[in-house]
Image (cartoon, grey):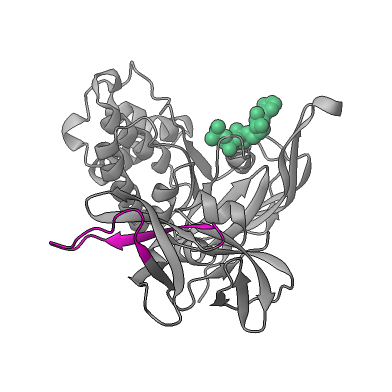
Amino acid sequence: MTAPVTIAARNVVKAFGAGASAVRALDDVSVDIRQGEFFTLLGPSGCGKTTLLRLIAGFEMPTEGQILLDGTDISTLPPNKRPVNTVFQSYALFPHLTVAQNIGFGLQMQGRPAAEVKATTERMLALVKLEALASRKTSQLSGGQQQRVALARALAPKPKVLLLDEPLSALDLKLRKEMQIELKRLQLETGITFVFVTHDQEEALTMSDRIGVMSHGKLQQVGTPRDIYVTPVNRFVASFIGETNFLPGTTVAGGVKLGCGAVVDTKTARNGTVTVAIRPEQVRIVAATEAGAIPATVTNLVYFGTDTHYHLSLSDGAEVVARQQSGAGEDMLQPGTAVALRFAPGAAQVLED
Ligand code: ATP
């Protein structure tokens, strides 16, 4: 059963400034974020992800459209009246307070009884595994520990929705990977809806239930990590997430005819000139003599240890990258070698533009 929608954006436009210098940070964005979901807004710098987060938090109001919480329009509700909390990139902790005082701060502000503040703080300390550091000042913590305090503080009042704005970007790679697992665990244990903002496609793919890919203030595609990776709707999504080969072609019965004359089996409702996208791991290099395969020449190779990326040229000059897993004792193909290519069945995707 599909979970109910917790947060919805309906035709949201957010413009900053007026006249010729106006910036349309969000341009008719509509999305449903479901209860208990780990939803990620992914896109390059300036695409509008933080603006959408700030509208959900209540720090900004939409120029047009609505933000709904459980079906009710909250567009004009101030931040402190929304059951929504935010974890910022900078953590924004109080350096003169201890870890426990930071975590209990929001609850105290809400006037909750001291016994409840203490019990919740202890539960949160255990959740983020910081019991041993409860009485330390936050200025004496590592980046990863500060991040945990920020998370615990935001989770303590049991918000319906937790917004996370690039919360891992200040951490080094190893710690970031650990915190990715930690965040996912916290989300599963608390059942709270997480809306996570990142420009890191790998982070989005590994952590999210669903991803909304944004560019120029628009949501380009919303789907599971697999949907987005396997069936990107357009060139932007295909190139922003993972590596992709783009091959121009023309539609024919049953597929697309590439510039080199080969016909790729693929489904499309489009007619005329199109672009076919195919991931490098879906391209298999076979012997030049293999019947029905697409002739190609190796132009370059890049060795990555676990796999090798072969750059190949088709007869019309189009370039294709094929990723081959490294095998023990295998000879690598050298530039100039004549080979042939096969695309994995169903792997070629015709893009919208
Ligand atoms: P980043 O990853 O760099 O934070 P982002 O995707 O979160 O980028 P936003 O911060 O949402 O992008 O910004 C979207 C656009 O709106 C940008 O062009 C930005 O310059 C503009 N913008 C954001 N806030 C304001 C503001 N207060 N006044 C004017 N322009 C703004």
Question: Residue, x 23% and y 55% (percent of image)?
Answer: 306
Foreground residue, 340 or 176?
A: 340
Asked where in the image residue 16 lies, by quadrant, the reply is top right
> Quick check: 75 left or right of 345?
right
Question: Residue, x 48% and y 34% (percent of image)?
Answer: 110
Vertical order, 328 against 79 (above or below): below
Asked where in the image residue 118 lies, by quadrant, the reply is top left
- Magenta segment includes 72: no
Residue segment shown in magenta: 316-338
> Quick check: 350 left or right of 91?
right
Question: Residue, x 68% and y 43% (percent of image)?
Answer: 217
Q: Position of residue 205 (x, y in %)?
A: 42, 55
Q: Position of residue 25 (x, y in %)?
A: 69, 37
Q: Position of residue 233 (x, y in %)?
A: 61, 62
Looking at the magenta stretch, what is its main secondary structure? loop
- Residue extending furthest toward the left: 329
- Magenta segment includes 320: yes
- Residue extending furthest toward the top: 96
Q: Quadrant of ligand 1?
A: top right
